[in-house]
Image: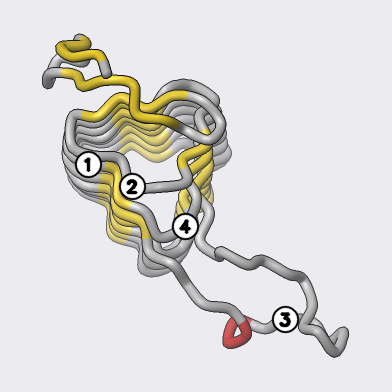
Amino acid sequence: MIKIHKSADISKKAKIGEGTIIWNNAQVREGAQIGKNCVLAKNVYVDKGVIIGDNCKIQNNVSVFYGVTIEDGVFLGPHVCFTNDKNPRAVNPDGTFKEPADWTLSKTLVKRGASLGGNATILPGLTIGEWALVGAGAVVTRDVPGFGIVVGNPAKLVGFADKSGKKVKNL
């Protein structure tokens, strides 16, 4: 059974997997695909065309923008924000308002089992590897290897973790 809070705004053109729970004030746009047994907490925004795998936990106020793919078993802490444009501008150089065709999408991939701490910001066009850990408040500016632990602004690789999240190697 799918559970959707009455205040959530879910497009009829989105696909929601069995057992998924979507909490209050969440928004899921057209073409988004949410897997089975996921939890989308309060105020989560899932943009058009986003793909989220099975068994993901997405905490309050997370923004998942167009071009992001999240594989199975991913945890996104509160206020995680993905970006999808390397050179964002509201207007073109001539002052005209930018239209969708005026920007270049950069795709982002979060691989199976990765965990992103609260308030992490992920710049566009990156891959977060399987079972990687991104520290709270990190600003990720480059790819994170599988099982890698990154922290800081800009995020730096400080070690490696096992599947349970325990640090197994320092750098």
Residue at 29%, 43% in the rendered image: 128
Which dot marks residue 98? 3
- Given contact means CB atoms under 8 Å apart, are the residues at marks 1 and 2 in contact? yes
The residue tagged with tag 3: helix, strand or loop?
loop
Q: Can you name the residue that lies furthest to the front here?
A: 171
Tell me how far mark 1 sits from mark 4, CA to CA: 15 Å
Among the two numbered marks 2 and 4 on one chain, the one whose residue lies closer to the N terminus: 4
| Colour convention of the picture | secondary structure
Question: Marks 3 and 2: which is nearer the front?
Answer: 2
Tell me how far mark 2 sits from mark 4, CA to CA: 10 Å
Among the two numbered marks 1 and 2 on one chain, the one whose residue lies closer to the N terminus: 1
The residue tagged with tag 1: helix, strand or loop?
loop
Image quarter where the C terminus lies is top left
- Amino acid type at image mark 2: Asp
Which dot marks residue 42? none
Tell me how far mark 3 sits from mark 2, CA to CA: 28 Å
Among the two numbered marks 3 and 1 on one chain, the one whose residue lies closer to the N terminus: 3
- Check disc 2: other Cα within 10 Å, few if <14, some if 14-19, many if 20+: some
Q: Can you tell which quarter of the image residue 131 is in? A: top left
- 121 with respect to 18 (left or right): right
Tell me how far mark 4 sits from mark 3, CA to CA: 19 Å
Among the two numbered marks 3 and 2 on one chain, the one whose residue lies closer to the N terminus: 3
Which dot marks residue 129? 1
Which dot marks residue 143? 2
The residue tagged with tag 2: helix, strand or loop?
loop
- Amino acid type at image mark 4: Pro
Q: Can you tell which quarter of the image residue 32 is in? A: bottom left
Residue picked out by circle 4: 124
- Given contact means CB atoms under 8 Å apart, are the residues at marks 2 and 4 in contact? no
Q: Position of residue 137 (x, y in %)?
A: 54, 25
- Check disc 3: other Cα within 10 Å, few if <14, some if 14-19, many if 20+: some
- Given contact means CB atoms under 8 Å apart, are the residues at marks 4 and 3 in contact? no
